[in-house]
Image (tube, rainbow, N blue to C red):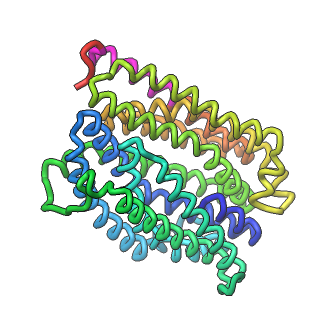
Amino acid sequence: MNVTDTAFIGRVGEIELGAAALGGIFYFVLIMLGTGFGTGVQIIIARKIGEGQRSLVGKILDQAIYFMLPLSLLILLLSYLFIDSWLQPLIESKEVYTATMAYLYYRMPGLLFAFGQIIFRSFYIGLADTKVLTWSTLVMAGVNIVLDYGLIFGNLGFPEMGISGAALASSISEVAAFIFLIVYTYRKKFVSNYQLFHFTKPDKEIFNSNLKLSYPLMIQNFLSLGVWFVFFLLVEKMGEQELAISNIIRSVYIVLMIPIWGFASAANSLTSYLIGNQRAHLIFKLTGRIVLMCMGGVSAFLVASFIFPAEILSVYTDNQSLIKHSIPVLYVVNFGALSLSAGFVLFNTLLGTGKTKAGLFIEMIVLAIYLGFVYLIVSVIKGDITAVWISEFVYGVFISLLSWMYLKWLFRKEYSLKRGLD
């Protein structure tokens, strides 16, 4: 959805392109609260599968729903009540602010269904049965492409809504993907096999276990995307063209991140599974292999972007000036993605051990370094947009280094690999 939205909005104008960046990141910041909780649930499900306790999976998921549904409704309510007072002081350009608000008005309802998808994502990644997530993503992207074409430009009998049309298309796409996951889960008999959606009375022990493991992840994810939102706010003060360039690069960057997020999720789930299966001695071997596969997946994207940079960027805009000024930034982001290939896998291996508080501490250190670097380039040195995006490489290097150091310490000091982890 990010890629298709940016590609279509890039044909509307620079202001809309920048507003979609700010609105999109703000939306993702809120989504990260649910994603953090979902990652904790995913770790617990994988651990129970490794221990052979499949019958508990349904209860774990039901308790997660009891938390996620009220959370999503609360976030949606607070957003509609206070979003104007939150964003108006932060966005310098009145035109960008107006367009951002128009985007978020139609985008926010999708949050309810995005949280629902997170629940299914936790379930399927915890089981290491992830093909359905590919299919649901294709459904979501397909619906979004058709509706973007119709609602942004007034084609297919739809009204011409501009940036608001992109937001509405994305929200409807979230609904389509959620419905697909429900139908698939029932048809494949996962509901009966894992005793899903029985909605028995709340289980305090399971609920507290979910929350204890997940709340550091919720804070960590919220801070991580929150800092990226601050990044875009600082870029917005550099100018509308710099913000538009950053939104284009953000979309390319997210494509580069696809294999990274996929392999990182695998590392997270499989680490927890090995611990539950009393085979913790294989974790470092597993992580090393995943890092190599992840770097290989990212490298395929990097080769294409180095050979055909203008062609790739032209997917997102036909403005030749934006394309020209985006190419150096694209090269920088390539190296940032490569550093994150190792960093995200190592960090998610750490989270898979259940040490989520340590993960939060490491993330806070790295984010402080990252934000300090961005502030230095934007406000002190007054560097250009290419220099600002070097921050992604800085983040990747430090998250890799600190995660690796902690894992080495953890397995040497706290655990005995001969007897496995408890």
Q: Report which quarter residue 168 is drawn in.
A: bottom right
- Give the quadrant of residue 63: bottom left
Give whichever of 25, 208 is nearer the camera.
208
Q: Is residue 188 magenta?
A: no
- The image quadrant where one finds the C terminus is top left
Relative side of 305 to 272, left or right: right
Identity of the residue drawn at 67% across and 57% down? 247
Residue 406 within the magenta-colored segment of the rendering: yes
When asked about the image quadrant of residue 20, the answer is bottom right
> In the picture shown, does residue 107 fall above or below 299?
below
| Residue 171 in picture, x, y percent from top left | 51, 71
Give the vertical position of 170 relative to 343 (above or below).
below
Q: Observer-nearest residue: 179 or 377?
A: 179
- Residue at 30% across, 65% down: 69
Q: Which region shows up in magenta?
A: 400-417
The residue sitting at 54% across, 28% down in the picture is: 291
Q: Position of residue 8 (x, y in %)?
A: 71, 67
Viewport quadrant of the N terminus: bottom right
Q: Position of residue 375 (x, y in %)?
A: 59, 45
Vertical arrangement, residue 46 with respect to residue 247, above or below? above
Per the picture, the main secondary structure of the magenta-coloured stretch is helix
The answer to whether residue 198 is visible is yes
Q: Residue at x 51, y 76 (%)?
A: 105
The answer to whether 378 is drawn above or below residue 179 in the figure is above
